[in-house]
Image: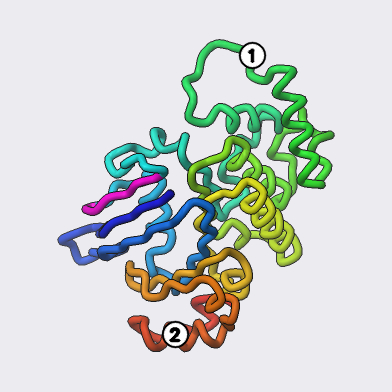
Amino acid sequence: MLDIREISKTFNAGTINEKVALNGLSLHMNEGDFVTVIGSNGAGKSTLLNAIAGTWPVDKGSITIGGVDVTGLPEFKRAGLIGRVFQDPMTGTAPNMQLEENLALAYRRGERRGLRWGVTKAERSLYREQLKTLELGLEDRMRVKVGTLSGGQRQALTLFMATLKKPKLLLLDEHTAALDPATAAKVLELSEKLVSEQHLTCLMITHNMTDAIRYGNRLIMMDAGRIILDISGEEKQRLTKQDLLERFAQLGSGEVSDATMLS
């Protein structure tokens, strides 16, 4: 479902501020893989997601999603293939639009737009029924503006929008980092539920080692723009936070602690 081959990205090349963010990175994900990504600050995690999404082009290498080579495609042309949830709950929704209007935009992701009703009666019924599965009572607030929702409700809604029209690839970019622990736990449980029920292929960045170990069928660790560890199956199930810290000390380019990969 995702095939990345030898991608590299350098910012401010040739200047005193030159930063190699991705360094010949390769990654292959099968359909249904749920991969968690950890690494110290500046390891290249968010740069990897931005490269996949097309936020900026890579300097070299190739990216294929669902059999489609998207390496040269701009971000908006990849939108039909990718669902994404950002760290900031304020990102990913239109706060001054009604909840059902936001859902209508998500439902039409990747389609040509024309002059027609923004929300049809059939769509409104569909949204209401599917929102019930979130168990947040949002199905009774279809006409409220999204900006009035709490951070947790907005993040749950954004996640729901990202998967409303099944994407080839779901990108979760530290999507619970701005939430309180209890709300973060609920959003993570919802993430796992949606990924499992829809058999989604998902790449989730997190600084929380416990979450990286608990969720998904595969874990990768990044450092200096490279993947230095790739664990799956029973080996992943046996992992502990201490194991990860020791592996980073052996394989990484510097010291790491809970201050840079939060536990």
Residue 176: x percent and y percent?
A: 63, 59
Residue 160: x percent and y percent?
A: 66, 43
Taken as a whole, is the magenta stretch helix, strand or loop?
A: strand
- Asked if 107 appears above or below 48 in the picture, the reply is above
Q: Which residue is drawn at 20% across and 66% down?
A: 16
Under mark 1, the amino acid is: Trp
Q: Residue at x 36, y 83 (%)?
A: 251
Under mark 2, the amino acid is: Arg
- Asked if 111 appears above or below 166 in the picture, the reply is above
Q: Name the residue under label 1.
A: 117
Camera sees residue 44: yes
User: Which one is in front, 103 or 152?
Assistant: 103
Q: Does the magenta stretch include residue 179?
A: no
Residue 245: x percent and y percent?
A: 49, 85
Count the marks: how many? Answer: 2
In the picture as drawn, the residue positioned furthest to the left comes out as 14
User: Which one is in front, 114 or 130?
Assistant: 130
Camera sees residue 19: no
Q: Mark 2 points at which residue?
A: 247
- Element assignment for label 1: loop
Left or right of 87, for residue 222 = left
The numbered disc on residue 163 is none
Left or right of 71, for residue 222 = right
In primary-sequence order, the first of circles 2 and 1 is: 1
The magenta stretch is 59-65
- Disc 2 and disc 1: Cα gap in Å? 55 Å
